[in-house]
Amino acid sequence: MTPRAHSSAASWAGALLALPLLLFLLAAVAWPLAHLVRRAFLEDGEALRQVMAAGRYRTALVNSLALSAAAAVTALLLALGPAWILARERFRGRQLLRTAISLPLTFSGVLVGFLIVVLLGRIGAIPKLIEALTGRQALEGAAYTFGGLFLGYVYFEVPRAVMTLESAFRRFPWELDAAARTLGARGLERMLRIGLPIAAPALRSTLAVTFSASMGSFGVALILSRRFTVAPLEIYTEMTGFLNDEVAGALCLALALCTLTVDRLLALGKRR
Amino acid sequence: MLGKTAIALSLMAVAVTAAVAQEKVVIQYDCIPNYANWGGVTALYKKTAGVTVPPDSKGSSVAMAALEKEKDDPQADTVYYSGAIGFQAAEKGLHEPYKPKGWEKVPAALKDLSGQWWTVHTGAIAFIVNTKALGGAPVPRSWSDLLKPVYKGKIAYDDPTWGGTSFTLVYGLNGLMGGSEKNFKPGLAYLKKLDANVSSYPRESIYNSVLRGEVPIWINADGNGYKMKHVDGGPVEVVIPAEGTFTMPLVMALVKGAPHREEAKKYLDWLLTAPAQAEFAKSYFRPVLAGALPPDIAAHFLPERDYKRARSLDLAKMAAAADALKKAWTEQIRGSGR
Amino acid sequence: MRSGFLRRRLFRRTGIALTALLALALLAPILITAAGAFSRAEWYGQRSEGAEVDSTPKLFRYVLEVWGRALLRSGQIVAVVVPLALLIGAPAAWAFRRLAFPGSRLLEAAALVPLAVPGVALAFSMIQCVQGVPRFWLLAAGHLAYTIPLVVKTVGNAVETFDPRLEDAARSMGAGRLETAARITAPLLLPSLILSALLVFAVSWGEFNVSFLLAPPLLQTFPAALYLTYTTNSFPVAAAATLVFLAPVVPALIAIQALGGEEFHRGLPA
């Protein structure tokens, strides 16, 4: 909806109403982040180089990126079917399923980590079940492996992906699809040439939401990661263990930059 | 109806806020409920004096780092550490010298003579083994046993850059293997080999994990193991390794610039009284006050001849080597963080 | 044609079944946890916790006793963050749509940027550069950074859906600006304001990343307490604490669903 033309007095009123927001963003977000950038580049440039060079920090950043990307894609794939069904079909229990799937949205990261331990810790529910059914011991302590951390991320992302995609699918212009079918286009062709292009913005925004949530994920990693480090954990360790503020700051910057870059890249070309 | 509920909730909120505002608190850094029975000790203090000491999960080194960071605006009143870290923190000027009531009863070797820190109880490093979780493997009896492939993925010890107990372990092992405060190579070489069998280096107390069988072998203070066995009834055996082990004093200090200074002093005084020391004894850490260890609890310890293998370590040398050793451990053992 | 119809039905049935399976998989661990809080089974570590928890009411009382202060702090933060987020975000969202000024689109986009900044980084940079501010307000600011965008989006979407001519009509009939705002705009916006409040509540209640790093011991919020129970307490205590945590947010979530809250897709920060 394009804003209607109005008087400059109205514009002033608008600016006044938005002033608290502007002030808040400047004071609470822009100022600290600018300080971070300044310290990392100007005062402690050494730290930034240290972070980028090979070693624990780079591994942590790479792990964060790899895990977040993999979890985002996996969550998206898992969410496609359910999102479609929830958006398109009417059936009894639909609202119940929606509520159930969106319940984990209220779970903090630490809670998700704990739940994975409940499932896959050394005396988790799944290993116990496997042992009861087959008598063999398997998957004990899987929660603390790379796979466990990955699963934690996916568990965290799937509800987000489902709900984001569902709202996008609900707005799908079905008339286009029906028209294409009348014109003789087959299922696959319709999906590739109409469905995908229309769904692409939704898929992109889903990926952006899940990716940035994973990159910032701290609670999950605190509970689950044992031998694998991810960037937020390294930041925490540097802050509290070594008092190494320079490195922590550089890591923060690197992490924030990576996340913002991917987020903006995914947003490119999205129509408002 | 809605209005009434809202009023009721607001009144409750006001009441609770008032209660919390009036509450007397003493903040202790490193107050892990399951370690040395701090949970029981602080609960007893609340009953005795009405003062709350909230739990705090910082390990010794992290507590020291926090104190350093907060130097200009201290948040903590008292702090608890493993001896070496306490020694180091005192050198950094983070404590206010204080001699609590009962000071004379603490042996000279276990306190800083000017009052910067003093021991409240001692422990010894041991293997805490959950026999049920070993999965058929034999109980390890020596440091060299731990290197055997049968224990792969079964061992854990706390991150020495987080907790003082583990730092004592790393430093002591280095000495045992032939190194010194200037030469870390022997200790780190052993730890590197051990790393193949280690499942994790936790930065928190994994007492409950070991009890549940999530971690079969925990190298930590013997008291924790005895408590698991005799209080929680877990399938746990405590082992003092054949080659020898190390004792460590666990110390308290008054933080410089403590926000609740007077209450903190009363608390520190109380920790050296018989009831507090008896409470520590319940977790199988040896109280510093002579005669405070009840005979029935003493009976549960391993025989004296095992403890002959436990040597004490020089706190000053440990403190001097602390930063370098922690750094070396992080680089060589923690390494590139898989 | 008939085979196509049958195929569609099969597709639909399978899809629903798979969706139900996903829901079950997501719910399973929380159900197990709830069972842990209410079961009478003997769990390792209970006895030495100094709590004598041998019954469910005592278990919850123990949790509230030890972590009551954290619960209160969470409540205090939420009580401050919800009104502030609405006050800062809602007028701005309305202004962006109705009273656009140069730079309003830029500002609106900027309001959403904090969502892409990892909480750890924001918390760390706040600690670094704002030395004198009381920690409580720093904490509130951190929460606001992640909740104001939700308000802006929710209220903005709502403003877009109702016809501006309603307001014009009122003005043309002689109502002053304030009266129009009070009697036309506010009631129309009320559902989105309530929805925003619920969203802010849910996100602020569960916020961990910023709170864990920013808050000194006496100000720690309930999610930090949760973390402590997970790492140092026995399973029943952890399970009970989890249920205490979830008790206020689950109703909020159901209400959000009922009001059609789309902006909760981001959920909580991890």
Image: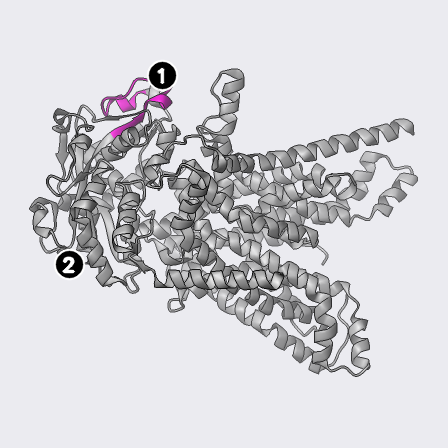
Instruction: Specify the amino acid type for callout 2.
Output: Pro
Instruction: Specify the amino acid type for callout 1.
Output: Gly
User: Does residue B145 sit above or below C90 in this rendering?
Assistant: above
- B138 within the magenta span: yes
Report helix, strand or loop for mark 2: loop
Give the crowd class for mark 2: few <14, some 14-19, many >=20 residues within 10 Å: some
| Subunit that carries the residue with mark 1 | B
Q: Measured from the top left, where is residue C154 in percent x and y?
A: 67, 60
Please name the residue shown 49% across and 51% down the image.
A255
In this view of the protein, can residue B250 be seen by the observer? no
Using the image as rendered, state which of residue C160 and residue B274 is in the foreground: B274
User: Does residue A201 sit above or below B242 in this rendering?
Assistant: below
Using the image as rendered, state which of residue B124 and residue C49 is in the foreground: C49
Q: Magenta segment, which residues?
A: B127-148
Residue on which the image places disc 2: B97
Quarter location, residue B230: top left
**Relative to C210, is C86 on the left or the right?**
right
The reply to the same-chain question for discs 2 and 1 is yes
Give the crowd class for mark 1: few <14, some 14-19, many >=20 residues within 10 Å: few
In this view of the protein, can residue C23 be seen by the observer? yes
**Relative to B81, is C266 on the left or the right?**
right
**Relative to B39, is C156 on the left or the right?**
right
Residue on which the image places disc 1: B136
